[in-house]
């Protein structure tokens, strides 16, 4: 028997699963995809099939070959004898897939990729400018440090620095 103690944690886990952003995004994508499939199928059946049908039958679904003769169909389109291969149906589905893939790529994927590339270029340019500013600040700080060290040793050349023959000399590398 399941204890009452486990039920709230199961419910909370289920709630957390449903509240994730990717689950909602996936649900929206499935709904939009289903609606988009209807549009593409309508384009194939209403535009592509008649264009292809100009060279033969008006419906791609009627294109077939017979694997075992004689292939005979009744008025409803049902096979009464033989083994037909309905390659027109496969051609129609393939055209639907290619059109769907082309529309998704050219209207969704390609523009998004260009947008993301522009965003990345802007970010890189901004980071490059920031890096140059940080590098410039770093160089200035290094110069200040070097000037302070030189002034502390007495080898600075700025005002108030001791230089000349009477100035105390810092020992060289050999200690003299």
Image (spheres, rainbow, N blue to C red):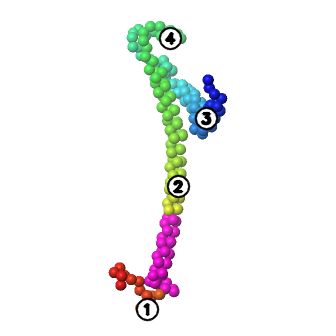
Mark 1, residue position: 166
Vertical arrangement, residue 166 with respect to residue 8, above or below: below
Q: Residues within 10 Å of mark 4 (few under 14, many from 20)?
A: few
Q: Earlier in the sequence, mark 3 or mark 4?
A: 3
Q: Which label sits in the foreground, 3 or 4?
A: 3
Q: Do the residues bearing badges 1 and 3 touch, measured as CB atoms within 8 Å?
A: no
**CA gap, disc 1 to disc 3?**
82 Å
**CA gap, disc 2 to disc 3?**
37 Å
Determine which of the numbered discs, if any, sits on residue 13 in the image.
3
Query: Is residue 4 rendered to the left or right of residue 60?
Result: right
Q: Secondary structure at mark 2?
A: helix
Q: Earlier in the sequence, mark 4 or mark 2?
A: 4
Mark 4, residue position: 78
Q: Which label sits in the foreground, 2 or 3?
A: 3
Q: Do the residues bearing badges 1 and 4 touch, measured as CB atoms within 8 Å?
A: no
**CA gap, disc 1 to disc 4?**
116 Å
**CA gap, disc 1 to disc 2?**
56 Å
Q: Secondary structure at mark 1?
A: loop
Q: Earlier in the sequence, mark 1 or mark 3?
A: 3
**CA gap, disc 4 to disc 2?**
62 Å
Residue at image location 39% in from the left, 83% down from the top: 171
The N terminus lies in which quarter of the figure?
top right
Q: Residues within 10 Å of mark 3 (few under 14, many from 20)?
A: few
Q: Position of residue 39 (x, y in %)?
A: 57, 30
158 falls in the magenta region: yes
Residue at image location 36% in from the left, 82% down from the top: 175
């Amino acid at each position: 028997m399941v204890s009452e103690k486990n039920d709230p944690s199961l419910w909370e886990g289920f709630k957390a699963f449903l509240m994730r952003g990717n689950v909602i995004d996936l649900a929206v994508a499935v709904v939009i995809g289903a609606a988009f499939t209807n549009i593409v199928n309508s384009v194939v059946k209403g535009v592509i099939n008649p264009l292809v049908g100009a060279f033969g039958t008006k419906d791609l679904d009627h294109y077939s070959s017979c694997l075992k003769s004689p292939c005979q169909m009744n008025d409803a389109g049902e096979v009464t004898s033989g083994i037909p291969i309905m390659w027109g149906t496969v051609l129609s589905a393939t055209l639907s897939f290619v059109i769907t893939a082309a529309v998704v790529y050219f209207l969704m994927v390609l523009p998004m990729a260009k947008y993301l590339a522009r965003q990345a270029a802007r970010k890189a340019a901004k980071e490059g400018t920031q890096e140059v500013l940080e590098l410039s600040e770093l160089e200035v700080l290094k110069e200040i440090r070097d000037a302070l060290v030189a002034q502390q040793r007495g080898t600075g050349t700025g005002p108030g620095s001791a230089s000349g023959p009477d100035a105390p000399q810092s020992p060289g590398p050999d200690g003299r």
